[in-house]
Image: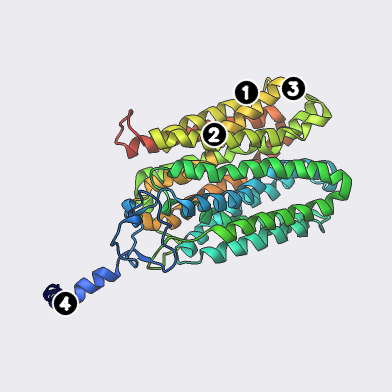
Amino acid sequence: MLSLGKMSRNDNRSFDESAATQLSNYSDKDKDDERSDSTTYIPGTEPIATPGDKSDVIGEPANKVVSANDVSLVPDGGLRAWLQVLGGFFLFFNSWGIVNTFGVFQTYYETELLSTTSASSISWIGSLQAFLLMFIGAMTGPVYDAGYFRALIISGALLTSFGMMMVSLCHEFWQVLLAQGFVVGAGCGMLFVPSVAILSTYFSRHLALAMGLAASGSSLGGVIYPIMFHKLQPMIGFGWTTRVLGFMMFGTLLISIAVMKVRVLPQRKRKVLDLAAFKYAPYSIFIAGSFLSFVGLYTPFFYVQLYDISKNITAASLVFYLLPILNAASIFGRIIPNFFADKIGPFNVFIPCGFIAGLLCVCLIPINSTGSLVVFCLLYGFFSGTFVSLPPAVLVGLCKNRAMIGTHMGMAFACTSIGLLIGTPIAGAINDASGFNAIWIFGGVLTMGGSLILLLARLLKTNWAIVVRC
């Protein structure tokens, strides 16, 4: 036994000396190549080991370099991974959920607070909010890549809740535009990209489902916040109602701040723009299709309640529940399609859902009964829900370098945000000039047209193959 121990120690010394010799012979080029790896290990951020995880292998170094491009190292499950989904859920709840709520504010402003202001002007508040949500993603993408994830979500939590509370003090259009449009919109923008970019580092095979579960938070926010506003406003007034919303936003965002944690980060700081990405045709055409779709997509969200009031289709007690019904249906529209997206590919699910949503918008024209309007809200909410939950999964597939996901998503969202900015104000101007039937045609045709352009992007990505997972 002693001789064996002595031999083992001698072997260890021999191995150490050999390893040291090899390390000392590294060329400068080898060292530079090693430093150029796109990602690095972050102490304390390794994924929790779960049965079947590669991190559970005995003898694996504790400080192993983790690459964002190595899909085999993605946990794809485990407690910490699903906590990121929970945190992402509340980021969506207070970003897209707030955007989806604006329809109830649009109705209140037109009938009460800003009754002397045109519908088109009021809609600029909501469209600016949605625009900043996606446009600021162009800046937060590289900021996220640089390692400031927590700074982004903390800043976003403070801005969104502060902006909503400042709305309680507003009496003029410009005041509401500043507080709800600019401040809340900027805060939402800081929350959105981190909510989707971090999930791609924890999930691979189940990425679409994870994003769908997180994105369902936007639908639930679009259900809870309008109902809270409708119930509280007559009892405690507009001022305290918006303050209560602000407190709830901050409280739920604290959950995200507490549970979310970065697993891997790029080693190098990213540029705000990666213009080379636009040379990849499927990526550029996808952005063009998304832009066109978003110009028309939110028309029913902003105007379906006003349409009901003007046509006296439903009882007064039901009017303010149309938007929550629409958003409630989109909860399933963010989860069920994403489940199938993991099976057949996100592109293959996103395109038909988008086309059906556009077709449904046109079908609003002949609706004149309570039942048919409620069914429309259910169906439109379901199929339009994919526009929030599936684009991030599609973009992951269009990004050749996973370490650049944050930047590429930010670029795509910045371009698409212009469609959100101009869409509903244009619809409002069309409504003032030509009536509701014209805006349903406007929204439906643009959404269907955008979906056809998305189909072209999908065909280019698969080299015109039809029956293939994409």
The residue beneath circle 2 is 447
Q: Position of residue 431 (x, y in %)?
A: 71, 34
Dots 1 and 3: beta carbons under 8 Å? Answer: no
Q: Nearer the viewer, mark 4 or mark 3?
A: 4
Say which label, 2 or 4, has the lower sequence index: 4
What residue type is disc 4 on? Answer: Arg
Nearer the observer, 199 or 377:
199
The residue beneath circle 3 is 370
Q: Can I make out residue 5 in this image? A: yes
> CA separation, marks 1 and 3?
14 Å
Mark 1 element type: loop
Q: Residues within 10 Å of mark 1 (few under 14, many from 20)?
A: some
> CA separation, marks 4 and 3?
84 Å
> CA separation, marks 2 and 3?
25 Å
> Residue placed at 61% from the left, 30% from the top?
380
Q: Residues within 10 Å of mark 3 (few under 14, many from 20)?
A: some
Q: Position of residue 416 (x, y in %)?
A: 52, 47
